[in-house]
Image (spheres, helix red, strand yellow):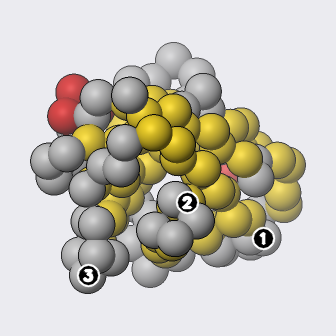
Amino acid sequence: QVQLVESGGGLVQAGGSLRLSCAASGRTSSTMGWFRQAPGKEREFVARINWSATLTYYADSVKGRFTISRDNHRNTVYLQMMSLKPEDTAVYYCAASNRPSNSPSGYNYWGQGTQVTVSS
């Protein structure tokens, strides 16, 4: 079992920054991902990172603005978000998997989510 707890969400003005954290406990997963879900929309891929942090992938909509990283000693994954836009407003979820995937169905474990609201 893997337990994931996100933190760091909040309200920020457009152009601002936030850093999300995801603390993991239990069995370590090789792939960690961030997803987001806006009201009335499907959950979408944001970013993922492999165990050694040598491979990262991003959705086109966040490329160049968001950075995913992980600290395996602290069992924590981060999502640094910069130049935030109102369309980034969503609940952000951390997820864990033992195989690489950009699809929500590829992840076995999920956090409870943290709200990010970007005002214009």
Q: What element carries label 3?
A: loop
Q: In this view, does 28 lie above or below 72?
A: above
Q: Mark 1 points at which residue?
A: 16
Binning the other alpha carbons within 10 Å of mark 1 as few (below 14), some (14 to 19) or many (20 upward) gives: some
User: How far apart, in angstroms, are the residues tagged by discs 2 and 3?
Assistant: 16 Å
User: How far apart, in angstroms, are the residues tagged by discs 2 and 1?
Assistant: 23 Å
Q: Is mark 2 on a helix, strand or loop?
A: strand
Q: Nearer the viewer, mark 3 or mark 1?
A: 3
> Would you identify the image quadrant in which residue 48 lies?
bottom left
Q: Name the residue under label 2.
A: 76
Residue at x-position 60% and y-position 50%: 23
Looking at the image, tell me whether mark 3 or mark 1 is earlier in sequence order: 1
Which one is in front, 78 or 104? 78
What amino acid type should be assigned to the residue bearing mark 1?
Answer: Gly
Q: Is residue 118 left or right of residue 85?
A: right
Residue at x-position 45% and y-position 39%: 26
**Identity of the residue furthest to the top in this view:** 40
What amino acid type should be assigned to the residue bearing mark 2?
Answer: Thr
Residue at x-position 37% and y-position 42%: 27
